[in-house]
Amino acid sequence: MKETLVEPVTLAAIMAARARIGDAIHVSPCHLSHSLSSLTGLPLHLKLENLQRTGSFKERGALNKLLTLSNVERQRGVIAASAGNHAQGVAFHAAARGIRAQIVMPLATPLVKVAATRSYGAEVILHGANYDEAYDEAMRRRVEEGRTFIHPFDDAEVIAGQGTIGLELLEQVPDIEAVVVPIGGGGLIAGVACALKESNPQIRVIGVEPEKLPSMLRAREVGKPVTIGAEATIADGIAVRRAGDLTLPLVNRYVDEIVTVDDEEIASAILTLLEHEKTLAEGAGAAALAAVVQAKTNLRHRRTVVLICGGNIDVSLLAKIIERGLVKDGRLLRVRVYLQDRPGSLLYLTEILARERANIVETVHNRAYYGVSLGETVIDVTLETRGSTHITAISHALKEAGFRFERIH
């Protein structure tokens, strides 16, 4: 007789998770963005999970898992391996319920994330050069100390907790026709897609992965999870090398399409959110919007929700993204200008730039380098500009004045 398989995650399980969690998790806003709707040609809503207490959706699944533990499991404590959002979600909600939590983080984890995790009440153990080594150490400690391991995505209770977002979307946007969700290991999209599709099968669910680490896409192609090579990406929150054993069947069943975006597209989406919505997103948090803005999938004017899943971005990375975005949009220009090494040459250059209404941000003036002749000097000038047309006008003015120059990218 053929054995009947029991689904690891169901709509009933997600509804139970929502009742269990109650008001311990913030019902994040989901508003219609007029500016992004105009930009994309879609009625576009943003579900702002970056506004959760710990800055991401991860605490939903972590809390649901914690609330299903037995008294014995609570007393023994929990352990997790994470370099970011999952760590903070487990740490905060475990501490709030008097459960001792250990989080194993790679040695290279940014100090700000280590400090945040500790501030939420967890014992942080730094171990290993990467997540895989941290995970192995967490599993060793789990066995040695009898703690319960809380997986970041491949756990039925964690998936059901993330799926509560889907239930909220059905209430916040009753006429929802499509949702775009980032994919790492698949816990988020598996839960959200299950909640939506089991309630309304007509809703289209699109997953988005980083181009460098499309682990779920590869798993779908071969029919099973496979481990892909490590790659660096600014979407570190979804930089997962292997899809989950529990999440893959759910993704296969409920997710209509998976697309990829590259780091430049993600960076542009971060800047778009910052400028148009005054919303701060991390790389993973902006991946779904990147896919929509870049038209990676045809949504045919469907009423669409984009999930902004997290906002825990390193400020130094954010500064780089802003600067590169300004360069790409033609609002920041750096030129190397060759001058005659005589009094008045620099004044003449600045007069031309002032006449073209270009604001000088930075200059580097050097006679000894760049391989110029003894009668010349070179100055690198960084300018605030108003776009490509303005850059063309500045270039024309410099040529008309007889300056030799080159644009620095």
Image: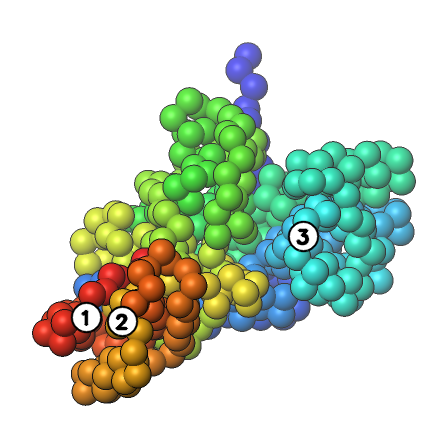
Instruction: Assign a secondary structure to mark 2.
Output: strand
Nearest the eye: 209 or 148 = 209
Residue type at tag 2 = Leu
Q: Residue at x 57, y 49 (%)?
A: 160
Judged from this view, the residue extending furthest toward the top is 1
| Figure check: 96 above or below 58 | below
Along the horizontal axis of the image, is 205 left or right of 403?
right
Q: Are marks 1 and 2 in contact (CB under 8 Å)?
A: yes
x and y, in percent, of residue 199 in the image: 40, 51
Separation of residues labelled 2 and 3 (CA atoms): 46 Å
Q: Residues within 10 Å of mark 2 (few under 14, many from 20)?
A: many
| Figure check: 189 above or below 36 | above
Instruction: Assign a secondary structure to mark 1.
Output: loop
Would you say residue 250 is visible in this rendering? no
| Figure check: 394 above or below 301 | below
Q: Quadrant of residue 7?
A: top right
Q: Residue at x 66, y 40 (%)?
A: 130
Q: Quadrant of residue 271?
A: bottom left
For the C terminus, the image quarter is: bottom left
Nearest the eye: 106 or 65 = 106
Q: From the image, tell me which residue sits under label 2.
A: 339
Residue 403 image label: 1
For the N terminus, the image quarter is: top right
Would you say residue 339 is visible in this rendering? yes
Nearest the eye: 223 or 329 = 329
Nearest the eye: 77 or 354 = 354
Q: From the image, tell me which residue sits under label 3.
A: 109
Along the horizontal axis of the image, is 77 left or right of 252?
right
